[in-house]
Image (cartoon, rainbow, N blue to C red):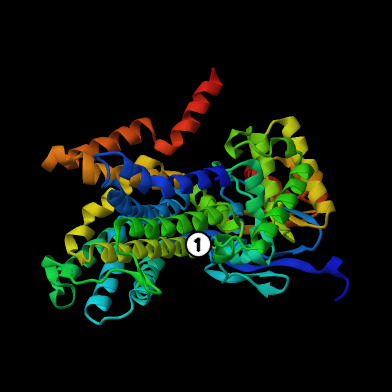
Amino acid sequence: MLRIGKLPISTFAFLIIIFPWVAHQIPGIEHYTDVMVFAGIYSLITIGLSLLMGYAGQISVGHAAFYGIGAYVSGILTARYGLNPWICMLAGISVAGAVALIVGAPCLKLKGHYLAMATLAFGIIIFIVFNEEAEWTGGPDGMSGIPGLSIFGFDFDSVEKYFYLVWGFVFAAFVFSVNIIQSGAGRALRAIHSSETAANAMGVNVSGYKVLVFVYSAVLASLAGSLYAHYLNFINPATFDLFFSIKLLIMIALGGMHNLWGAVIGAGIITFLNYEWLHYFEEFEVIVYGAILLVVVIFFPDGLAGIPDMLKKRLGKH
Amino acid sequence: MNDTSNENILEVDKVVMAFGGLMALFKPDFSVQRGIIKAIIGPNGAGKTTLFNVITGFFSPTEGTVRFKGQPISSLKTHEIADRGISRTFQTIELFGNMSVLENVMLGCHTRVRASFMAAGFCLPGARRKEKEIQERAMKILRFIGLADKCNDPADSLPLGEQKILEIGRALASEPELVCLDEPAAGLNETETHVASSLIKAINAKGVTVLLVEHDMKVVMNVSDEIVVLNYGQKIAEGPPKEIRNNPKVIEAYLGGDT
């Protein structure tokens, strides 16, 4: 099983800390810090998804909706009612968690891919709500005037400051998730993935765990949504469509869903493709994503994070 | 009743299990005394595995009740029954193939040492201590079943015989009072069968009551104190091995009416 040690985590933290400085030194990539803010926001979602899909084996095709719920709860409560953004963030988390419980509980009692179906439908419904409830959400034009974040008079008003804020959250979520994976709870999740029958017989509350991890992943997605809203100060429904849910799946498939590193690596690469490297393809962008998914599934079923292990096995055989 | 040796740990009371029009079980009645090894035998399709599935909560019976230590358990969920102290193995192996041998047994401890999601996530000291405790306990069980040296191998890399033994080990990890073994010797060669038989006896010697479904009559006659015979979902005989061996009804069920 994959142990995630302290050394790689601290190395990772170090690289993140020096990133803005390094990016600033190299001409032409100064704006990469800005891209990395989005990579961090997406990582928050993919970390939760990795736990849900890679470890517990449950598929969600609707995480854009939880991301959107976080963004809109934060957006509406701060811009329209002037509430404290941090409280709104908590409100978003509570709403997303409660909704996940309502959507997840009935279908996670069943075996099979009912969650995928339910989340697919749920994602579409929420997308329609964002578009149609224009009084609240501003409709397809989106809503602006969402304030930035500050704490005790310290404003996260520059890209660098926001970068550290977002990656601080990513780091916390990552460590929290690693701890879960390496505990009895993580063992139970992997057992569920492998054999629900046996897990049940060994006393694991299978549906309980599935719901718990689904709610956890929804909470992380909502947190990411709030961070997104306060960073851009503007949101519109197009950000939270079905294609974004699918992009999230491509992220964890590319990175490797059986490994939390994969969640961060996949989110990082797809973010850079999305914001930087794929402009050239314009409308054909989608085809590139399709090709990536195809290559990964056929040649690296364990994703990029699984390559070291794959090589080790290959070399070990000779 | 201070004398626990005569207490019935499990009572199967007129259980009916119907799948549509098919009566997989029709009112078999028997009880299992604490501390014994009881075998359930019968021809294919007699309802043995169905009975196990009813006892462990995978099916809830159409009629009748199952009582464990005097308490009805038929309405409980599978994991709740496991919590109460009934553990099982499966006819078709249901190991966690993607996990190591040690982790499989550690998962078996799930009911006894529970770590909450939050405590684990924040890595509270209690959660870490529990993990250590579980690991030590699992290693102890692996030494008992003779798989300690393979603790880090993936479970699905073991040969069939050892996989069956590992399933028994995992079932023991929850410190059950009753363990239900579904064909532990199926598919095993003679040496492996011998190992499995001695393991069943060793488990029993530790005070665990054993309920056994098995087709290998040598194993059944060798290990069991009492036997229940099922045919077409009904009990046709019950008693010590010697009696069962000579029971005409049993011979008829196995060999057909004309003999």
How dense is the environment of label 1, judged by Cα within 10 Å: few (below 14), some, or many (20 and up)? some
Point out residue A203 in the picture as x, y percentages from the top left corner.
Answer: 60, 60
Q: Residue A68, can we see it?
A: no
Q: Residue at left 12%, top 41%?
A: A282
Quadrant hosting residue B6: bottom right
Task: Pick out the residue farthest to the front.
Answer: A25
Query: Does residue A300 appear left or right of residue A207 in this picture?
Result: left
Q: Nearer the viewer, residue A49 or B74?
A: A49
Residue A19: x and y in percent read: 38, 46
Quarter where residue A152 is shown: bottom left
Residue lying at 37% horizontally and 46% vertically, measured from the top left: A21
- Residue B256 drawn at (x, y percent): 62, 43
| Mark 1 residue element | helix
Q: How many marks?
A: 1
Q: Residue at x 59, y 65 (%)?
A: B119
In the image as oriented, which residue stretches furthest toward the bottom? A81
Seen in the image, is B77 located left or right of residue B150? left
Relative height, residue A108 to residue B184 (above, below):
below
In which quadrant is the C terminus of chain B drawn? top right
**Marked residue chain, label 1:** A
Q: Nearer the viewer, residue B114 or A76?
A: A76
| Residue with the most extreme top position | A318
| Residue nearest the viewer, comparing A21 with A117 | A21
Identify which residue is drawn at 73% across, 41% down: B217
Measured as percent of width and height from the top left, residue B250 is found at 70, 49
Quarter the N terminus of chain B occupies: bottom right
Query: Left of A125 or right of it: where is B13?
Result: right
Disc 1 marks which residue?
A209
Q: Amino acid at mark 1?
A: Tyr
In screen coordinates, is A126 left or right of A315? Answer: left
